[in-house]
Image: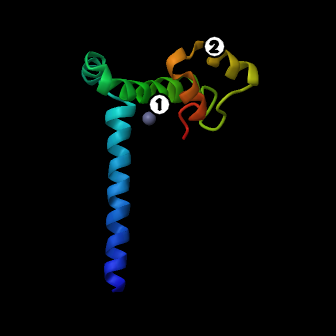
Amino acid sequence: MLMKIIFGLSLGYFIATWAESFIHQHVGHACPRLRRFWERYPLIGTPFLAAFYDHHIVHHALTFRKDFVTQFESDIEREMLDEKLPHAWKKTIIADDYGVT
Ligand SMILES: [Zn+2]
């Protein structure tokens, strides 16, 4: 019984880790070809494009610019970013804490 529990926990951990890594690479940092596909089929692709923008652009390029700890240097910097965000995804990006959650 103990071995089954250990095996189950290990398998669950492996699957969760692999899924996170796969989604990070193929959605969060999607290649241009995949993004063009999503743009061609917006009913399916829009949520993926929003996730890509939230992670690749906002999380990696527009926040944490000083170091890997400081998301914004000031409220003014955060407010300036808020002004630049696409209106359709603004609420979601802010609710996601700018790609952190
Ligand atoms: Zn990333």
| Residue located at (32% from left, 82% from top) | 3
Q: Indicate left or right for 61 with 12 as reference.
A: right
Location of residue 51 by image quarter: top left
**Pointer 1 or 2: first along the chain:** 1
**Can you tell me whether the CB of the residue at mark 1 lies under 8 Å from the nearest atom of ligand 1?**
yes
Residue 49: x, y in percent?
38, 24
Residue 26 location in percent, x, y? 31, 34
Nearer-the-camera pick, 71 or 1: 1
Which quarter shows the C terminus? top right
Q: Position of residue 82 (x, y in %)?
A: 63, 19
Q: Which mark is residue 86?
A: none
Figure coloring: rainbow
Label 2 CA crowd tier, 10 Å (few <14, some 14–19, many 20+): few
Figure disc tally: 2
Query: What's the distance in space between the residues labelled 1 and 2, CA to CA?
Result: 18 Å
For image coordinates 26% across by 16% down, the residue present is 40
The image quadrant of residue 32 is: top left
Q: At numbered mark 1, what does the secondary structure look like: helix, strand or loop?
A: helix
Tell me: 2 left or right of 87. Answer: left
Residue bearing the label numbered 1: 55
Q: Residue furthest bottom?
A: 1
What is the three-letter code of the residue carrying label 2? Glu
Q: Which quarter of the frame holds ligand 1?
A: top left
Residue 52: give x, y in percent of width and height: 41, 27
Say what amino acid the circle numbered 1 marks: His
At a point 26% along the width and 20% down the height, the residue shown is 41
* Viewport quadrant of the N terminus: bottom left
Q: Element at badge 2? A: helix
Q: Which residue is mark 2?
A: 83
Residue 89 in the image: above or below residue 8: above
Q: Quadrant of residue 77?
A: top right
